[in-house]
Amino acid sequence: MRSFVPLLFAFIVALFAASSGLGALADSASLCSSGTLDERIAACSKVIRGNAKATWAYINRGVAYARKGDYDKAIADETKAIEIKSWQEYARVCLRCGMV
């Protein structure tokens, strides 16, 4: 079930983007939750440039940075996600995405 949630989210974003002409955003959203670590970081950065309140993108990019060993950037992204949402909502997002 946990691996299903990111796929469902990417599918919903892709449907929205296709109907509104935002195909590039859908591609970035999809890569932000899958792909290589460098692809994830680049894609999440693109999503964040388009929507600075995309908590899930900060979380995914932070996880990618942590897996690469860049802990300062990982902490900065996770901290930003908590600033955008309360820490309780941050925990809910992490649970929904299967990160906890």
Image (tube, rainbow, N blue to C red):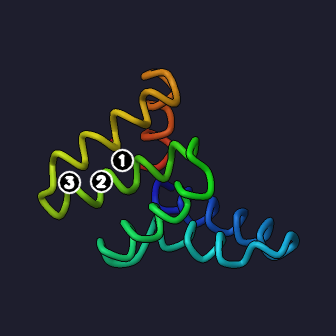
Residue 34 versus residue 83: which sits nearer the camera? 83
Residue 6 versus residue 61: which sits nearer the camera? 61
Does residue 66 appear left or right of residue 55 in this picture? left
Residue name at image x 12 percent, y 58 percent: 69
Q: How many marks?
A: 3
Label 1: state its secondary structure: loop
Does residue 25 appear left or right of residue 44 in this picture? right
Label 3: state its secondary structure: helix
Check residue 63 in the rendering and tell me which mark sits there, or answer none: 2
Farthest residue, direction front = 49
| Mark 2: amino acid | Val
Residue placed under numbered mark 1 in the picture? 99
Residue placed under numbered mark 3 in the picture? 66
Does 84 sit above or below residue 93?
Answer: above
Q: Mark 1 or mark 3, which has the lower sequence index?
A: 3
| Mark 3: amino acid | Ala
- Separation of disc 2 and disc 3 at Cα? 5 Å
Instruction: Verify CB contact (< 8 Å) between mark 2 and mark 3.
Output: yes
Tell which tag, 2 or 1, sits nearer the viewer: 2
Does residue 31 appear left or right of residue 26 in this picture? left
For residue 16, what is the image quadrant? bottom right
Percent across and percent down for residue 73 are 24, 49
